[in-house]
Every structure is written in structure tokens, then in C-alpha cells.
Image (cartoon, rainbow, N blue to C red):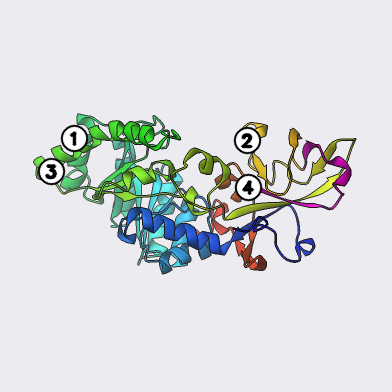
Amino acid sequence: MKDDWFKVQHEQDLDTPSLLIFKEKVLHNIKEMLRIIGTPDRLMPHVKTYKMIEIVQLLLASGVTKFKAATIAEAEMTAMAGGQFVLIAHQLVGNKIHRLLQLQKKYPYVHFASLVDCRAVAEAIHTTFAKKNSLAHVFIDVNNAMDRSGLAVDEELLDFYRDLVSSEKYPQLICEGLHVYDGNFRQSNFEERKNAIDRAFEPVNQIIEKIQAMDLPKPMVVCGGTPAFTVHALREQVYCSPGTCLISDWGYSDALPEQRFEWAGVLMTRVISKPKKGYITLDLGHKALASENPLTKRVKFLNLTDYEFISQSEEHLVLKVEDWENVQIGDILYGIPYHICPTINLYNEVYVVEHQEVIGTWQVIARNRKITV
């Protein structure tokens, strides 16, 4: 790889702060996802990282047919791109249940599903869809490790699954399987991460065995995200739903050394001030770079060395640099965000790069909370 692979031609013609998406690297990462899992049939990539129609279409062209989303808007974006199976990996409450019904009516050729982890929501979905004589597809959200959402892996989960698939209590619901997210396991050592994930997944295996022993329908099991991808890919009977790795970022490239994904999203920013000796200011504030992590873990610059983070505010990022005399106002810096997902969500559109040349823009359409539904 060239040392300056991230630099684009005619960079001075581009606005900053901006986000560059390198199409060749996106395609590389899709191929790497397929290499890890072996077949696109078991891949259910999460669209929440990129939220763009064009990237979903690249996945479709590679043979991927199933997708996971976090919001109604992301599910609609996936349908607009041509996706025909979308699992909304959230328990929908309130008016979102009505929006799901509207989404299903607008895109009748798309198979939509959502998560449930309690009878109250199952009943709410059932009631809403029954009024329109429609069927809703659901997965039970399983809490096997993360304690963020989902049912604990115990007899209550088994009873809930039995009731959902029986069609007696919830005739308008079709329970398709289990959703198991264990994003809390991020050990850099693969064997340590694998051991922790396997231990947490064992009770899920036991529940699946009990389901089969009761002669109930075998559940479709959707597992993990990017950190667990290389572990769950080894389970031949489950579907894997990595997301971040399709663009990749500094955080996961450091944390998951066995994964060979490449940085496909690069921030471009300009030096806009030199307020005092040793200090430079960039136009890379909170509105252009996700700021949920400590200041020192927000961006890694590719064409700047010997720098120290001083502060970040809404429109500014201040650095202390060693080579202050040689940095000029207007200079362009390129950086890799520590966390790409919330960073992409800050942009309405991105520049698309091929062979170091900007060939157009893609709209980050699903950063909106609502598209049409």
C-alpha cells in the first residue's frame, strides 16, 4: 500500500471538514467478510455504520441477501436499495410499531422483522397488526452477556418462544428465531475473546437444544457484531451481522488484530488557524468527528506526526505540534476516526474516491430519523 494512499487529487477543490469513502477498500472489506464466513448466505451485515444506498447495493452485488438495521429509516433505506430481508435490531415501542406497519405496507416485497424481549411489546405489535389483518415477523432478543436489552437465557425465554411460535396466543406474530448480541467482548487476544464469547453463548446452545427437544420450529439465530464476527463465523448454523468492519476504523483495527479489514473512511480537515506558537486549529469539531471517547481517542492523523490533542469544541480541534513552523494555514490533514459509526452519522453526504480521485458523492440518507415512513 502506498504511504499516501489516502491523498486525493485536486484536494484543494474539496470542502472541509468532510468524509471520504474509498470504494476499492469497501469492496476489499466485503470480500474479507465473505472470506471469513465462507458464504454470503450466512451474512446479515448491519447497515447502521454507513446508512447509504450505494453500499447496500455493493453488498447485494456480492450475493448478500439479508441485512440488519437499527432504525425504521435504515430499514427503509435498505428496501430502497433493493434489499429484501431486513431485521430491525431494536424492540420497537410506541409509534414505531405503527411505522413498522406502514413500512411493511409500502414495501410489501421486503421481509421485515423486529425484536421483542417482553410480552407487553409482543402484545402491542400483535394488536396493531391484527387491526389491519397483517402479520408481523419477530425475533426474540436474547441477553446472554451485555445487559443492554433482551431476555435472560432461562425458562422464561423458552416459554416465550413456545408461545410465540404456537400461533394461539399471538396469531398475528411469526417468531423466526433468536437475536444474540454480545458486543461487550472486545479482548484484543483472539483466543481470550473467543473463550469469553463461547462461555456466554453456551446457555444459548442449551436453549436451542431444548427447543428442538420439544419439537418446536428450529430458530434462526443471528449473532454478534464486528468484534464477535470471527468467533460466530465458526458456528455453521448461525447468521453473523458485522457492521463497522465494512468501513473499519482506528478503534477496531487496534482492538481486533486478527481481522484484516482496511480503513475505507477517511476524514479530511484543514488548518484554519495558528493561534500561538506550537498550536494549530483544525475545522474538525464535535459536529464533524464523534466525540463520545476521550479526546486522545477520536482521530488518528495519517500525514501529521508529533502532535498532542489540546481541545475540541463544536467547530474546532486544537493540536500542539512539533513542526509548527512548517504547518501552513490551509494545509489539509487526513485522519482515521476512532469510531466511524457515529462519525458518518454527522455527514449528509460523503465524497466517493476511486484511484485517489473523487468520482462523486453518496448521500447518507438513513442518518435521518425518517425518510418517508
> Pointer 1: what residue?
206
Closer to the chain start, of discs 1 and 4, is: 1
> Pointer 2: what residue?
297
Instruction: Give the x, y percent position of residue 210.
Output: 14, 37
Tell me the amino acid under the disc marked 2.
Lys
Tell me the amino acid under the disc marked 1.
Gln
SS assignment at label 1? helix
Q: CA distance from mark 1 to mark 2?
A: 39 Å
Query: Quick check: 232 left or right of 10?
Result: left
Q: Residue at x 49, y 38 (%)?
A: 255
Find out whether residue 15 is within the magenta segment.
no
> Pointer 3: what residue?
212
Q: Residue at x 60, y 64 (%)?
A: 362
Closer to the chain start, of discs 1 and 2, is: 1
Closer to the chain start, of discs 2 and 4, is: 2
Q: CA distance from mark 3 to mark 4?
A: 46 Å
Query: For the view shown, which residue lies furthest in the front direction?
Result: 2
Crowding at mark 2 (Cα within 10 Å: few <14, some 14-19, many 20+): some
